[in-house]
Amino acid sequence: MTELNIVQAVNQGLRRAMESDSKVLLMGEDIGKLGGVFRATEGLQKEFGEDRVIDSPLAESGIVGTAIGLALYGYRPVIEIQFDGFVYPAFDQIVVQVARMRYRSAGALYLPITIRMPFGGGIGSVEHHGESPEAYFASTPGLRVVACADSTDAYWMIQQAVASDDPVIFLEPKRRYYQKGEVDTCADLSTVPPMYKARVMVEGSDCTLIGYGPTVTTCLQAARLAAEDGVKLEVIDLRSLSPLDMPTLIESVKKTGRAVVVHEASSSGGVGGEIGQSLMQSCFYNLKAPVLRVTGYDTPYPSSRIEDDYLPDADRILDAVEKSMSY
Amino acid sequence: MTELNIVQAVNQGLRRAMESDSKVLLMGEDIGKLGGVFRATEGLQKEFGEDRVIDSPLAESGIVGTAIGLALYGYRPVIEIQFDGFVYPAFDQIVVQVARMRYRSAGALYLPITIRMPFGGGIGSVEHHGESPEAYFASTPGLRVVACADSTDAYWMIQQAVASDDPVIFLEPKRRYYQKGEVDTCADLSTVPPMYKARVMVEGSDCTLIGYGPTVTTCLQAARLAAEDGVKLEVIDLRSLSPLDMPTLIESVKKTGRAVVVHEASSSGGVGGEIGQSLMQSCFYNLKAPVLRVTGYDTPYPSSRIEDDYLPDADRILDAVEKSMSY
Amino acid sequence: MDQFDSFVQLLDTNGSIIDNPRYQSTLDAAALLAFYRDMVLVRQLDQQATALQRQGELGLWAPLLGQEAAQIGSARAMQSQDYAFTTYREHGVAWCRGVDPVEMLRFWRGTMHQSWDANLHRLYGYQVIIGAHALHATGYAMGARYSKRVGTGEVGRDQAVMAYFGDGAMSEGDINEAFVFATAYQAPVVFFCQNNQWAISEPTKRQSLVPLVQRADGFGMPGVRVDGNDVIAVHAVTMEALNRARSGQGPTLIEAVTYRMGAHTTSDDPTKYRDGADDELWRGRDPINRLRTYLRAEGVLNDDLESELSREAESLAERMRQGCRELPDPDPLSLFDHVYAGPDARIDEQRREVAAILSQERVN
Amino acid sequence: MDQFDSFVQLLDTNGSIIDNPRYQSTLDAAALLAFYRDMVLVRQLDQQATALQRQGELGLWAPLLGQEAAQIGSARAMQSQDYAFTTYREHGVAWCRGVDPVEMLRFWRGTMHQSWDANLHRLYGYQVIIGAHALHATGYAMGARYSKRVGTGEVGRDQAVMAYFGDGAMSEGDINEAFVFATAYQAPVVFFCQNNQWAISEPTKRQSLVPLVQRADGFGMPGVRVDGNDVIAVHAVTMEALNRARSGQGPTLIEAVTYRMGAHTTSDDPTKYRDGADDELWRGRDPINRLRTYLRAEGVLNDDLESELSREAESLAERMRQGCRELPDPDPLSLFDHVYAGPDARIDEQRREVAAILSQERVN
Ligand SMILES: Cc1ncc(C[n+]2csc(CCOP(=O)(O)OP(=O)(O)O)c2C)c(N)n1
Ligand SMILES: Cc1ncc(C[n+]2csc(CCOP(=O)(O)OP(=O)(O)O)c2C)c(N)n1
Ligand SMILES: [Mg+2]
Ligand SMILES: [Mg+2]
């Protein structure tokens, strides 16, 4: 067991991915000497050279677009988008080109590209540094979208993402980057749970909490508080936003009859709505209450001085649980 | 009453908007002499000059980005995006800049920009000409997203969109462009129903069909067929995808207890999921069956030779109604 | 500015050779005859496809009429290990890369998104999104560099990439970002811009008031402007640019000045935005006629060869007519193939749904 | 290439005036003294803000240290009817547009997304998205043209727009599209690129192997490269470019060669990617010192004036320290203001939800 925080775990995972496959390249702004603004690629250029850890010109569409060409050539590019708020200039290349290459070519061509992105708010920074754009990608056929919530997942899931022959949007919970965890780095990649499976973090019988990325920690806090009042909450780390691991969610909701989805992204059009709708379709008669959502509000991301009022916290989750139980 | 097809109605509506406000400018690729590839702006450059009907260089981000500057200067730009599939290069400017200007400036600045877009499939064309990107925009706070389904709405809603002080994504049902309708062009803009209200097209008691844009016609077909078997379907033209007119939807579902949402966009992450989740939250006890979805599938848009198998049709809608009734 | 004040021309509009101190053509009579054959056949291919669209056999077609020299001259300068990325209009390039004309029709008939096997022909499928593929080409060229397939001097090993796009594309951010990346990494890519004077209804001056080739210097790469209707000149400048690329000297921008003699696509109506005068002017600059005049004057081309060639063209057309109608429609269930590498629960469920619908339909 | 082989310089690093046949400065002693004051005060402003961030009063700050001449010289060339769009680093431009330094802090403290009233100062707020605002500037300039506020010759009527961005921004598609639109419509915009040698950790050569100013010609506009640490030269070239723009002669690209003497932002650590040698070199090119030397030599600046100025600087710093702490925190319910022009049911419901939470909290 090694103690690593999430960003260190990403760094170690990337190093291991590069060691095990010489076709793996890292691309992005400031990922070389600087090691990225969060240091996720620290030391990797020194170790693997400038041809495998590539500082890109300041152009996101260009980074993703050239990564497509590199992937067609036979490489496995891993892109770092510096902040969630800066991914949009590459949106066309991601949703029109990356997502559809396999489909368009009837399987003849495919793009094993991983697009890493710190996401979510709560770091007290300025505009564009606290976004949650995941729904845009999760609703795009052809992309896989996953989010890690702790060091162990950061370490293994990044390796699974890089190894995946599908393009993967890999979301890293920015404000939890320095959250420490014990990682068994000796385990084998082929034996760790696949990144498309959700994980039941805490078992409970009264209501299911579904979170991902930064809100998993928040859900666990809420579960602890609820336990003190004898309310047994089941906490699920979604891990994969596309595809959704519906069997795991359904099994839980069939048991609890209630669910609350928690994410930082706005409510309208967020992943929570898709989960709620899907649960309604698959276990209509089991639902004792409507699936509820505890999310960021339907506004742009606010100034940092009031971001805490915007972000879901344990209290809001418990209010929602209470509301759900009251049905 | 004048008989106009949908694209003629857009053209007439634009002309009237330009006549009534000299600050209204049209921008886009090939909208001048050519009048747009669908002729929505036919004759307008001749009538209003090259400074008000502006052929843009071939750069979508540039078109939207310069429209922002023009709006800040005091103009009301109306942008034509030539096809739904070509809007993505402008995504950053639309969701990060256009959508947030008012919020970012605490109301000091605002952007009365309308972005027109033909959308949806079924025209037998090549890749990128049959897309339904509406969910990306409907899930973006700060944008208004509306879709017209017939000539009357095309004529009036485009004028309302242009008059709106919020940025509006205006979706035009490409494959219905030549569908004719009687338009009362003498009515007064201030008296026609607001574009944010859904419209009950057919009243019914058994199940509610919710469509928008091209699928409204499909829903009406389904309702006619169902009526022959004595099944009374209520058909609602959503008209506004953001905001959703929940009161109208709720009232209908409280009556029918069942709803089927119909759109061409993929199911996962589509507007249908948001509607279903919202209905579950607001009339849980009234729902006799889960809200169901009849949509495009969770794949990229297919080749035209099989697009009919991809697109929702009356049969699939009736199957869904049957399934809903079977609960 | 008149676009014709300065460009490389080796064969003038009257079909006579022009000396150029800088560019000499290496092509012998046989090679030029082969180019002539290429141009005649792709024009036939183009006209036949246009006809098939009129007859409702194709959903759409983008004619190359008038751009035969630009496409054949440049594509024939490529080597087999090179790779090309094109737009929807480069049928002549596909022809040179060995794509069967019937295969080309798949995309336009709507039976497949990608018409041919990209790996086999080392040619990416038709790209509709303006400019997007210039970045793919640049990335592919970066790959060649990282794989030590550049500057080795080993014949057949060094690779270059061709990126084809139009005058309108020069305005897209992606094209300009491609210039940034290509120069920053000295990638072996040749940007081949066919300035056919029009982006649908917009003349080139809507995109730029100065010659497009001027853009090259600003990004730090050589730029060359060539008479795009002169197949000999196009071949010569492209050969040099590809050699520079393969030998590790980085990217080049070529502006091939040509003219879109036909409509933008079969759904376009050019009479709405341009008058016949230009068409007239450019008919005099036809890329095929001038080579024909030259080859006949040289005695390389004669009536026998011409009638043989027209027979060949006619049988090509015949093969296209028949092959087009015989193109298999996709299985509706193929809707669900190749969205992801592995199985996906949602997709599988939806496939079952459609399968059920189809079997129902068979029953009724 | 050495970036210093060719640029406009009117005041050398030793503080002596250089004759330039092309550019003459119109500035008298009083004007130069005012520039000196500006530069000293914005450097103070910058250092105070940096200190406030260290003390936890600001979430972040992007220092302008070293770029005072580029910002003051250019912004002082603007007229009141002009308009400017800047990045997060142009505090000196905000200063010249009359923004109170305390107001500037709102954005960095996280109390507002836009620090000042854009309409009042005719200055758009700090733009974080690299390149995006160059298009806004171009569109605004197009607006001036469509409104006949260009080329009238009427003093105070003709307008120009300044678009500020950095060397890294030159790679973004949006910047290049801005060049396309500005030249296509001959918009009265001046693109002012501060090449401070770094885009966070990436040196300018990562973006371009040739001088950035070369980009201008490729798009069909004049480009001028100026010593960005020479406030006199910056002012002169910007004056000319703004006059061209206002008189209807279209856009200009100015590359101001300067140096980011500090960190990219307060969260950056430059020691990871650059060594002290450059810092040393550039300390010798300090924009303030050279003007000081000149003004003292000219006898325009003396100890009295200097000590008066430092008192002024100190009271500015004091006002910032106090004003920063007094900046009102936003009302949590303002979360829901100004998303849309009119009321919105979802937003109103969510506002009520938060209001309820807040009153609960007050109860507990
Ligand atoms: C991103 C994008 N925007 C708009 C279009 C619509 N469109 C198709 S072709 C075309 C004109 C392209 O002109 P040019 O680059 O000169 O190529 P040409 O068609 O002349 O060969 C346009 C605007 C598109 N396909 N992609
Ligand atoms: C679209 C976008 N991508 C990335 C970033 C992250 N970022 C912020 S500043 C910066 C470097 C900008 O360099 P330059 O343009 O030279 O301006 P400078 O900071 O040197 O003034 C980067 C990459 C961003 N803000 N926006
Ligand atoms: Mg063209
Ligand atoms: Mg810089």
Image (cartoon, coloured by chain):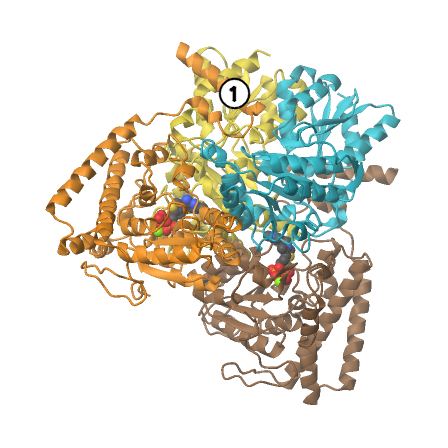
Chain colours: A yellow, B cyan, C brown, D orange
Which image quarter holds the C terminus of chain A?
top right
Q: Chain of mark 1?
A: A
Judged from the image, the secondary structure of the residue bearing numbered disc 1 is strand
Q: Amino acid at mark 1?
A: Glu
Front-most of residues C65 and A193: C65
* Residue B34 percent location from the top left of the image: 68, 55
Asked whether, in this view, residue B157 is left or right of residue B207, the answer is: left
* Residue B215 percent location from the top left of the image: 74, 36
Front-most of residues A106 and B27: B27
Asked whether, in this view, residue C20 is left or right of residue D48, the answer is: right
* Residue B275 percent location from the top left of the image: 65, 27
Q: Residue furthest left?
A: D303
Asked whether, in this view, residue C248 is left or right of residue A285, the answer is: left
Asked whether mark 1 lies closer than 8 Å to ligand 2, one says no
* Residue C64 percent location from the top left of the image: 68, 66
Look at the picture and state if B207 lies above or below C115: above
Front-most of residues A278 and A5: A278
* Residue A47 visible in the snapshot: no
* Residue B292 visible in the snapshot: yes
The residue located at (26%, 43%) in the rendering is D42
Q: Which residue is mark 1?
A: A234
> Would you identify the image quadrant in which residue D50 lies?
top left
**Label 1 Cα neighbours within 10 Å, binned few <14 / some 14-19 / many ≥20:** many
Q: Residue furthest front?
A: D154
Look at the picture and state if B178 lies above or below B100: below
Which image quarter holds the N terminus of chain A?
top left
